[in-house]
Image: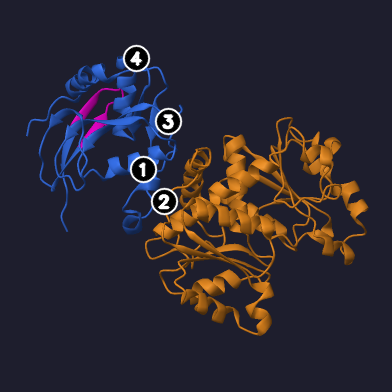
Chain colours: A orange, B blue
């Protein structure tokens, strides 16, 4: 028997996107294939399609993120939806309203979809369980748990540059412990059949039992990057460096910052990715970030197409 | 029922379209059947701009009822649409909704000078004020039947008729 998945409706179709964990490969592939068509839409004179005309999409950002919010907003607008942005950190909750009261009020304003970013893991799940059945929820990052559209846009980017997932060696580098992006990437790569996923990080920035996610652990960049096809860097959050986890930014860069020398251990045609925003000189050297192997800006462009695919598939199910 | 030979109908389409081909003419086929036909017509008619194909999934008017088509392919219009005389090719003309969607999509690429509709089979049953200027065969069919264009492995086109299961 299949495990119950709160993201799927009775027909096994995607109703909410909360996490990549537990999604079957055909749903992921459908999202990626649909995104491919939206890439070409963005190259036209009119970059919009009428799919979500008349739908109201609320961006509920309880945690700041200019880029993610903007790409969701652009994606929704290119689908012809009406978009309402709420930076809730600065309004209702500070007046004492609970999360679900906020959601109820916005539902009463005829919301069709919520895009939710929250510092608490599980916030999007909570909202998805609470809303009326016609409303869809997209997790745009919850605590340390998941950031599924980032994971999807990352595998979409890989697919654009590398033909076959089942022949790839992929390394994820940096603060795995606090990273919802890393988690979503690992799940997506696993579902799509990538045979070798490596994580490279100091012990203090790795979750315990990370091997159970099906990854190989390295603490040394030269060994970890050897012959990889894809290098996925993670953002090192400034607040981590003030705690006991890391001695200093300079020290981190010395051992784990991606420089041309370290990248030379990867395959010559390896691509370099980063979810942004980048800390140049901390996790990645400027020369690499802007270099020939970098696909960091294409990731941003593809992120819009992938979010269009997710929103249109959800709205149609 | 004896179905007409799709290859003969295609030859007839090409013959009828010849006088319409000018310096600004471009061909656009609606996926999947219309794209097969347009590809063949592109060779026969010697149209200069590369062939265009449309996948109208993002423009369908039944999205809110049936959701997104599971196999969307990118549309591909590899020429400037502004000022072109476009020959839009579809396999079966029925309700007219596909053609409406295709025209809406085309206008998001630019403003064509004209659009001419060529259909291999007009099966009647229009729900919108849309007509084809060039038709291979007119074949009125009841709603309970579905006519479909198919392609063999070697590229030969043929028509088939299917009953639609009623609930």
Give the residue at mark 1: B104
Give whichever of discs 1 and 4 has the lower sequence position.
Answer: 4
On screen, A180 above or below B115?
A: below
How dense is the environment of label 3, judged by Cα within 10 Å: few (below 14), some, or many (20 and up)?
A: many
How dense is the environment of label 2, judged by Cα within 10 Å: few (below 14), some, or many (20 and up)?
A: some
Chain of residue at mark 1:
B
Give the residue at mark 3: B81
Chain of residue at mark 4:
B
Q: Residue at x 72, y 51 (%)?
A: A276
Give whichever of discs 3 and 4 has the lower sequence position.
Answer: 4
Please tell me if label 2 and label 1 are on a single chain.
Answer: no
Helix, strand or loop status at disc 1: helix
Q: Residue at x 44, y 72 (%)?
A: A110
Residue A42 shows up from this direction: yes
Tags 2 and 1 touching, CB below 8 Å? yes
Give the residue at mark 4: B46
Q: Magenta stretch: give its range.
A: B148-159
Please say whether residue A244 is one of the residues in the magenta stretch. no
Q: Quadrant of the N terminus of chain A?
A: bottom left
Most distant residue in the left direction: B1
Tag nearer the camera, 3 or 4? 3
Give the residue at mark 2: A50
Q: In whole angstroms, how far apart are the C-alphas of marks 3 and 4?
A: 18 Å
Helix, strand or loop status at disc 2: loop
Q: In whole angstroms, how far apart are the C-alphas of marks 3 and 2?
A: 20 Å
Most distant residue in the bottom direction: A96
For residue A227, which quarter of the picture? top right
Helix, strand or loop status at disc 4: loop
How dense is the environment of label 1, judged by Cα within 10 Å: few (below 14), some, or many (20 and up)?
A: some
Please tell me if label 3 and label 2 are on a single chain.
Answer: no
Residue placed most toward the observer, A178 or A309: A309
On screen, B113 above or below B15?
A: below
């Amino acid at each position: 028997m299949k495990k119950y998945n709160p993201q799927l409706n009775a027909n096994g179709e995607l109703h909410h996107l909360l996490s990549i964990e537990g999604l079957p490969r055909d749903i992921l592939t459908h999202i990626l294939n649909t995104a491919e068509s939206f890439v070409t839409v963005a190259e036209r004179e009119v970059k919009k399609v009428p799919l979500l005309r008349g739908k109201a999409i609320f961006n509920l950002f309880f945690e700041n993120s200019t880029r993610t919010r903007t790409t969701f907003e652009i994606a929704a607008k290119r689908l012809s939806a009406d978009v309402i942005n709420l930076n809730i950190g600065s309004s209702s909750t500070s007046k004492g309203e609970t999360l679900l009261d906020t959601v109820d009020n916005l539902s009463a304003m005829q919301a069709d979809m919520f895009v939710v970013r929250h510092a608490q893991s599980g916030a999007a799940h909570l909202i998805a369980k609470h809303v009326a059945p016609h409303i869809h929820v997209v997790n745009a990052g919850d605590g340390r748990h998941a950031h599924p559209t980032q994971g999807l846009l990352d595998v979409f980017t890989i697919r654009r540059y590398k033909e076959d997932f089942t022949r790839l060696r992929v390394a994820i580098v940096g603060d795995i412990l606090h990273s919802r992006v890393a988690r979503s990437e690992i799940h997506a790569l696993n579902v799509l059949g990538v045979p070798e996923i490596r994580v490279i990080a100091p012990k203090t920035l790795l979750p315990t039992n990370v091997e159970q996610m099906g990854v190989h652990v390295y603490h040394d960049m030269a060994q970890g990057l050897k012959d990889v096809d894809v290098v996925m860097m993670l953002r090192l959050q400034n607040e981590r460096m003030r705690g006991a986890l890391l001695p200093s930014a300079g020290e981190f860069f010395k051992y784990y910052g991606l420089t041309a020398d370290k990248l030379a251990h990867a395959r010559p045609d390896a691509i370099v990715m980063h979810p942004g925003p980048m800390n140049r000189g901390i996790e990645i050297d400027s020369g690499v970030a802007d270099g020939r192997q970098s696909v960091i800006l294409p990731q941003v462009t593809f992120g819009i197409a992938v979010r269009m695919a997710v929103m249109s598939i959800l709205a149609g199910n | 029922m004896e179905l007409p030979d799709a290859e003969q109908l295609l030859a007839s389409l090409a013959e009828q379209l010849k006088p319409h081909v000018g310096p600004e003419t471009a061909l656009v086929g609606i996926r999947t059947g219309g794209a097969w036909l347009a590809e063949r017509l592109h060779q026969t008619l010697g149209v200069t701009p590369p062939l265009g194909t449309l996948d109208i999934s993002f423009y369908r008017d039944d999205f809110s009822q049936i959701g997104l088509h599971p196999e969307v392919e990118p549309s591909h219009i590899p020429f400037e649409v502004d000022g072109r005389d476009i020959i839009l090719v579809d396999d079966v003309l029925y309700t007219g909704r596909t053609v409406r969607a295709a025209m809406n999509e085309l206008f998001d690429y630019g403003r064509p000078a004209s659009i001419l509709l060529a259909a291999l089979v007009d099966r009647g049953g229009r729900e919108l004020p849309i007509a084809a200027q060039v038709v291979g065969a007119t074949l009125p069919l009841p709603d309970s039947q579905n006519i479909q264009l198919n392609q063999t492995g070697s590229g030969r086109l043929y028509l088939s008729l299917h009953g639609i299961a009623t609930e």
